[in-house]
Image (spheres, rainbow, N blue to C red):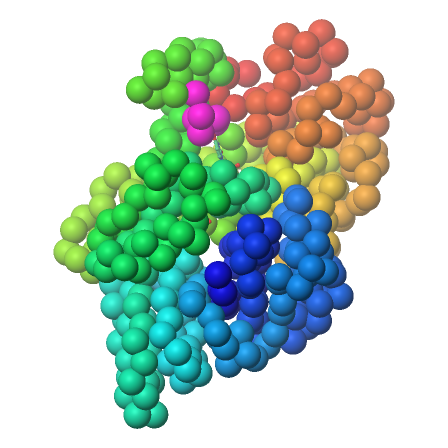
Amino acid sequence: MKVCIVGTGYVGLVSAACFAEMGNDVRCVDVNPEVVATLRAGKVHIYEPGLETLVQRNYADGRLTFTTNLAEGLAGAQFAFITVGTPSRDDGSCDLCFVEEVARQIGRHMQAPLIVVDKSTVPVGTADRVRSLIAEELASRGADIAFDVVSNPEFLKEGDAVSDFMKPDRVIVGTDSERTAEKLKELYAPFARSRDKLIVMSIRSAEMTKYAANCMLATKISFINEIAGICEKVGADVRDVRVGIGSDHRIGYHFIYPGVGYGGSCFPKDVKALIHTAHDADFKPELLEAVESVNARQKRSMAKRIAAYFEPQGGVAGKTLALWGLAFKANTDDMREAASLSVIEELTALGMRVRAYDPVAADNARRLLEGNDLVEIVGDQYAACEGAQALLVITEWNQFRNPDFDRVKASLTAPILFDGRNLYAPRNMAEAGFAYFCVGRKD
Ligand code: UGA
């Protein structure tokens, strides 16, 4: 089948590469000529394990091509996927300017019947808006070409995006047309082999499903972080509690790991956007507002704990914190809404120096932290510890799971370890001679 993908961010590029891998003819369109040049040179501009190999292979075989020219991308295409960014506005609402511009451009350039697929995360009602923008453009050039608009939200996790696309839990297709649903089923057949995996529903329900899924996951995280906070006060250990509740299959073990709060490009933005949508619809989203405020508190919790620890020793001013990890989670270079940024902001505001290391996100972090003279980013996890007063682990990279603790101890001025991801066993840390502070356990 012939597919045009507009926007080569991580959703667009992963979708494109995976569709091409299944033998489809995929054309990617991006407005940024530098991105297109990079992709044509066989390089991938985002960090996503497994993606570069897939892109290179399909590009070499000619099933995957890149252009800045939408008309060229649309020529002969049966589907046009909209996979552009939908950033948050200051008021938390979703900014649709890129989606709307792509819709207008599609209306201007399409020459043959087309199924337009909204894959970007967009508020309920956006497909109707996309439909009317395309219709307006067609009308203004006197063209009468059939098209349909479908909602097909993505559920990819950064770091696992290729395998999530290849083996999805479900594929959601929002459409009121049986014919369009059949076409989408054909396109997704290699990924959702079991027919049950492809769920067809109304367009608005599909748009809402995306937000409901992310908000449910964010709720689970804020819930366990709230329980962790209570555990710290009452002398329970949230790790035991997690296993205890997770063994009930109605609850499950997944996605209830306490930590430093959720970050990334999706949960913070999507929770805010659904809160905004609810208010617009005259509905007070009490639970979602609590999910957000619990997360904001959690993101500050480690900085507060470190400041409180050093309070009796004259405060954190002039002291150095070694920081392992900067990305919002492991296996990504993404720094958006990363908890590390909150910690750095809070502690450097108090005069603490931060010497950080991240295996992949260092360059992105450097750009964001430019101008903060109290932050240094180094190229080695042990170098980060040299002469620092304490170590904080904030991203769960595998290489931090079993480090050389003797080396860490020898590098720090005192063996003090704050663990924002509960990577280590408290007993082992005590045996290794560390003062060890983790999440959801009384110090
Ligand atoms: C999330 C969803 O998991 C995807 O299904 C969705 O498609 C994607 O958003 C999106 O809307 O594009 P992602 O943002 O890549 O994916 O990251 P997650 O792995 O979900 O993690 C989000 C945050 O929650 C991270 O900061 C992570 O550290 C935190 N987290 C996750 C926890 O604190 N505890 C957990 O148990 C799980």
Q: Quadrant of the C terminus?
A: top right
Q: Is residue 121 visible?
A: no
In the rendered view, does 284 fall on the left or right side of 129?
Answer: left
Label count reads: 0
On screen, residue 314 above or below 30: above
On screen, residue 42 above or below 165: below
Residue 121 position, x and y percent, is 39, 56
On screen, residue 200 above or below 423: below
Residue 161 position, x and y percent, is 55, 45
Residue 63 picture quarter: bottom right
In the rendered view, does 245 fall on the left or right side of 335?
Answer: left
Residue 28 position, x and y percent, is 56, 67
Seen at 68% across and 13% down, the residue is 429
Q: Is residue 179 visible?
A: yes
Residue 316 position, x and y percent, is 65, 37
Seen at 69% across and 59% down, the residue is 61
Toward the left, the furthest residue is 282
On screen, residue 375 above or below 37: above
> Between residues 80 and 345, which one lies in front from this camera angle?
80
- Is residue 350 magenta-colored? no
> Between residues 19 and 183, which one lies in front from this camera angle?
183
Seen at 37% across and 71% down, the residue is 114
**Which residues, given as a range, are shown in magenta?**
253-258
Residue 432 picture quarter: top right
> Between residues 434 and 158, which one lies in front from this camera angle?
158
Seen at 28% across and 80% down, the residue is 135
- Is residue 255 magenta-colored? yes
Q: Main secondary structure of the magenta part?
A: loop
